[in-house]
Image (cartoon, rainbow, N blue to C red):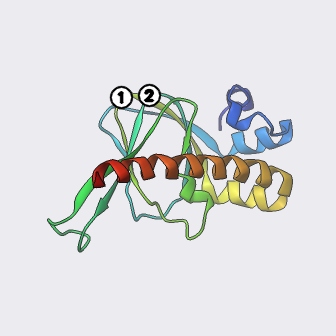
Amino acid sequence: MISPELLRRYPFFSQLSDANLKAIAMVSEELEVKAGTRIFDEGQPANTFFFLIDGSIDLTSSVGEGKNSSARKVFQIGEINPEEVFGVSALIEPFVLSATGTAVKDSRIITIDGKALRAMMELDNHMGFIIMTRIAKIARDQLAAIRIQMAAAWA
């Protein structure tokens, strides 16, 4: 459990009620990870939603034939900076991670139990709307960044 005051500091959580912040804090933990630590792997179940307090996280995805094939190539598809969320797959079906997350620097992260957060969002539709609206904006921005990377790769 973390303090609701920790969540209250950040714009991502700013429109949530005190009751929402307390409920989320109850299913959250603060985690410190060292540079080079793999936080999660692409293709694994997405059980945790993350918020980066300090540090930097690289998101990578692999493309190619077969899961263990030497023909697979790894691409950096994003970088998570302080005050950004990641692991949004924990809130979107089929709840499977679409990238691998690795700490680039020593980092401080808030981990939020994805299943518990989904249950809260289902019970409190206003809370769910606020969070999913923010997630949609993040997804839109990430898609735009990936389009730019793809255009550069094809140029």
**Numbered badge on residue 25:** none
Considering the numbered disc 2 on the image, is that residue within a helix, a strand or a loop? loop
The spot of residue 76 in percent (x, y) is: 33, 47
Q: Is residue 31 left or right of residue 34?
A: right
Q: Is residue 62 left or right of residue 144?
A: left
The spot of residue 5 in percent (x, y) is: 73, 26
Q: Is residue 143 above or below residue 64?
A: above
Residue 77 visible in this rendered orientation of the protein = yes
Q: Amino acid at mark 2?
A: Gly
Question: Which is more toward the observer, 135 or 7?
Answer: 135
Q: Residues within 10 Å of mark 2 (few under 14, many from 20)?
A: many
For the residues labelled 2 and 1, say whether their Cβ atoms are less than 8 Å apart.
yes
The spot of residue 39 in percent (x, y) is: 40, 46
Q: Residue furthest left?
A: 70
The spot of residue 140 in percent (x, y) is: 59, 51
Question: Which is more toward the observer, 8 or 11?
Answer: 11
Residue at the (77%, 48%) spot, across then down: 130
CA–CA distance in space, label 2 to label 1: 5 Å
Residue at the (78%, 62%) spot, across then down: 122
Q: Is residue 114 left or right of residue 143?
A: right
Count of numbered tags: 2
Residue 28: quarter of image: top right
- Residue on which the image places disc 2: 55
- Residue on which the image places disc 1: 105
Return the disc, 2 or 1, that comes first in the chain's sequence. 2
Question: Which is more toward the observer, 60 or 22?
Answer: 60
